[in-house]
Amino acid sequence: MLQKSLWSIVCLVLTKVLIAQGPPILLDKPIMLGANKGTLRSYIKINDMKPFDFNTLMVEADYNLSNQIAFGVEIPINHFSDKINLGDLSIMGKYQFYKKDGIGNSTRIAVKAKQMFPTGKKLETMVLGMGHAMSYVGLAGARESLKLGVQSELGYYFAPSNNHLNFLSAKLGFGLPLLKPSYPVNQLNLYLESEANFAQSHLGESQYGIYLAPGIQYAKGIYTFDFSYQFPVAQNFHNLISYHKNSAVLLGARIII
């Protein structure tokens, strides 16, 4: 009994260290902070798209109702055509259904649903404005260790009123901590995150985009600071030209509340 209790304490402490190393920059996290805890995040994203260039100030908030259930909201404020506009608002729900902690490692898997509302421009461009209500369902997973973090997400975006906008999204990220683990956290992380989007074919031509995003993150106590640069590896869009990304730069910060 004593040995089992000591094992549980060790796992709990190491899990807190792993979780405190910082969340991924572009991917979502399946790891819950605990009941009645949440995160406030704000970032600026400079979007160089093929048809449109615009900058976004994104304000995000999430709250954990329990150790397994979280809800969140995203509010994008865009600078486009020399004007300030509200983008597409969204709400999110997440349920963590798998958890396994060990010595120096932790694994989590969560199911996620997201609803986006057409409050932005009618330009069929994500965040700036799709012009249609859009939904998302997917799975997010992460395996964290003292030496490397691996995050992934697989999901599907669909617009019931205009299904040519639908696409499958797959994401994979790696986080490398550069400092020795500590709690309270004081960590510098390098990230390499990837994204692949696959839309419906058009006139027999495949439509897809594959992107890489190196980034760096500094986490200190309850604060985290992020920088990321995303660029395309390959992309081929036809009737979804507004999905074409040239580059995106993200600079932001978040706080645990």
Image (cartoon, helix red, strand yellow):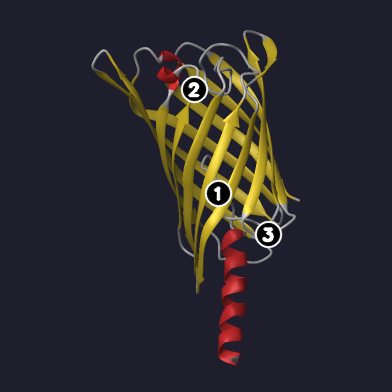
Figure quadrant of the N terminus: bottom right
Residue 29 badge: 1
- Separation of residues labelled 1 and 2 (CA atoms): 27 Å
Kindly identify the residue that appears in the image at 57 percent across and 51 percent down.
95
Residue type for callout 3: Gly
Dot 1 or dot 3, earlier in sequence = 1
- For label 1, the SS is loop
Expressed as whole percent of the image width and height from the top left, the position of residue 112 reads: 54, 44
Task: Give the left or right position of residue 102, taking residue 72 as reference.
Answer: left
| Residue sitting nearer the eye, 254 or 89 | 89
Residue type for callout 2: Pro
Expressed as whole percent of the image width and height from the top left, the position of residue 14 reads: 58, 70
As drawn, 87 above or below 257: above
Residue type for callout 1: Lys
Q: Nearer the viewer, mark 1 or mark 2?
A: 2
- For label 2, the SS is loop
Dot 1 or dot 2, earlier in sequence = 1
Residue receiving disc 2: 160
Residue 34 badge: 3
